[in-house]
Image: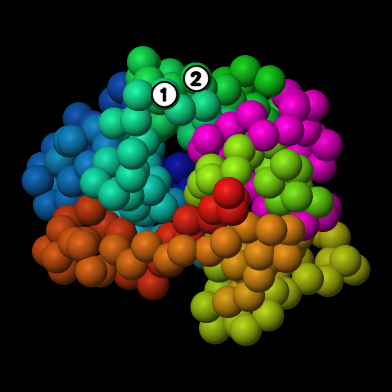
C-alpha cells in the first residue's frame, strides 16, 4: 500500500492528484485515528501523518490525512492566525497563486476577504495565467500568497516583479519555496532537463532550480523588504513536535514599502 501511495504521488499529474485527493481524504482519517500528532488547520489529531515528497526529498509523518496540510502549510496558518491581521482586518484584497486545497475553501468563506485565486493549470483556481505576465492592474492587493511556485518558473525575478506590481504599497506576501540551507547561492543549471536529473539536482522532477540562503535577495532585488518570522520564539518544542513543523524552516514575510 505504501509503495502504491508513493508511486501515485510521484507519477500522476498535478491536476489529477488534486481531484483524487478529495476521495482519499474521506478514508485516510479513519486509518490514522489517534492523538500523537495534530493539525492546527483542521484541528484534528491522528496517530501519525502520511509521508510525502519525491524519492530524493521524501519525508515521513508530514501530510495531514484530513486536510492535506504539510509542514509549511501548518506554519503559515499559525502565522496568519496568531501573528497577522489576516483574520481580523475589516477588509483585505488577497491574491492566492497556486491555491492550496487546505486553504482555499476556508479563505473563500472569510467575509473580510476579497479573495482571488490563480494558477497556470489548477482546476480549483479562479483564473489561469502565466505568472511572468499577470493580467491584473497595479496596486490592487493587500496580501499575496505564492507558495512553492518560484522553483518552477523560467524567470523568478520577473514573476516576483509582477507580484510586486499588483500589490498595494504597504502590502505583504508569503512566498515559500524549497530551500537548501547548506547552499549560500541558489543552484541552477539550464542543461539539466530530464525529470530524473531534475529530481536528483533540484529535489523534484518539475523543479528548475534549488534556492539557497540567498532566496530573500531575489525578492529584495525587485523592491520587497524582508522580515523573518522565527516560530521557535513563539511555540514550544512540544507544540512544534505535535504540529510536525520543519525545524529548519524559515518563514519570510515580504513587504512592499509604502
- Looking at the picture, tell me which residue is in the foreground, 206 or 122: 122
Residue 207 located left or right of residue 46: right
Q: Are marks 1 and 2 in contact (CB under 8 Å)?
A: yes
Query: Which numbered disc, 1 or 2, marks the residue closer to the eye?
Result: 1
Picture residue at 51% right of the left edge, 38% below the top: 143
Does the magenta-highlighted stretch encompass residue 207?
no
**Which quadrant of the structure image shows residue 189?**
bottom right
**Which residue matches tag 2?**
114
Q: Position of residue 14 (x, y in %)?
A: 62, 35
**Which residue matches tag 1?**
91
Residue 132 appears in the picture as rendered: yes
Bounds of the magenta segment: 128-157
Picture residue at 55% right of the left edge, 68% below the top: 179
Picture residue at 15% right of the left edge, 58% below the top: 239
Helix, strand or loop at label 1? It is loop
Disc 2 crowd, CA 10 A, few/some/many (<14, 14-19, 20+): some
Amino acid at each position: 500500500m505504501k509503495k502504491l501511495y508513493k508511486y501515485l504521488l510521484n507519477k500522476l499529474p498535478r491536476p489529477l492528484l488534486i481531484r483524487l485527493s478529495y476521495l482519499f481524504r474521506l478514508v485516510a482519517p479513519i486509518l490514522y485515528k489517534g492523538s500523537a500528532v495534530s493539525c492546527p488547520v483542521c484541528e484534528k489529531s491522528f496517530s501519525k501523518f502520511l509521508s510525502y515528497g519525491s524519492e530524493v526529498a521524501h519525508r515521513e509523518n508530514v501530510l495531514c490525512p484530513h486536510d492535506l496540510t504539510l509542514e509549511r502549510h501548518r506554519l503559515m496558518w499559525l502565522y496568519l492566525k496568531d501573528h497577522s491581521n489576516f483574520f481580523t482586518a475589516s477588509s483585505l484584497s488577497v491574491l492566492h497563486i497556486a491555491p492550496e486545497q487546505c486553504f482555499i475553501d476556508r479563505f473563500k468563506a472569510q467575509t473580510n476577504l476579497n479573495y482571488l485565486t490563480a494558477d497556470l493549470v489548477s482546476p480549483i483556481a479562479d483564473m489561469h495565467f502565466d505568472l511572468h505576465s499577470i493580467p491584473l492592474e497595479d496596486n490592487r492587493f493587500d496580501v499575496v500568497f505564492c507558495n512553492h511556485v518560484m522553483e518552477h518558473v523560467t524567470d523568478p525575478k520577473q514573476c516576483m516583479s509582477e507580484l510586486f506590481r499588483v500589490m498595494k504599497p504597504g502590502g505583504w506576501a508569503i512566498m515559500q519555496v524549497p530551500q537548501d540551507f547548506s547552499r549560500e547561492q541558489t543552484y541552477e543549471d539550464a542543461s539539466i532537463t530530464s525529470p530524473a536529473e531534475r529530481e536528483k539536482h533540484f529535489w523534484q522532477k518539475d523543479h528548475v532550480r534549488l534556492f539557497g540562503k540567498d532566496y530573500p535577495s531575489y525578492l529584495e532585488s525587485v523592491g520587497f523588504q524582508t522580515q523573518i518570522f522565527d516560530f521557535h520564539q513563539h511555540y514550544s518544542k512540544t507544540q512544534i513536535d505535535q504540529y510536525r513543523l520543519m525545524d529548519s524552516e524559515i518563514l519570510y514575510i515580504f513587504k512592499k514599502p509604502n
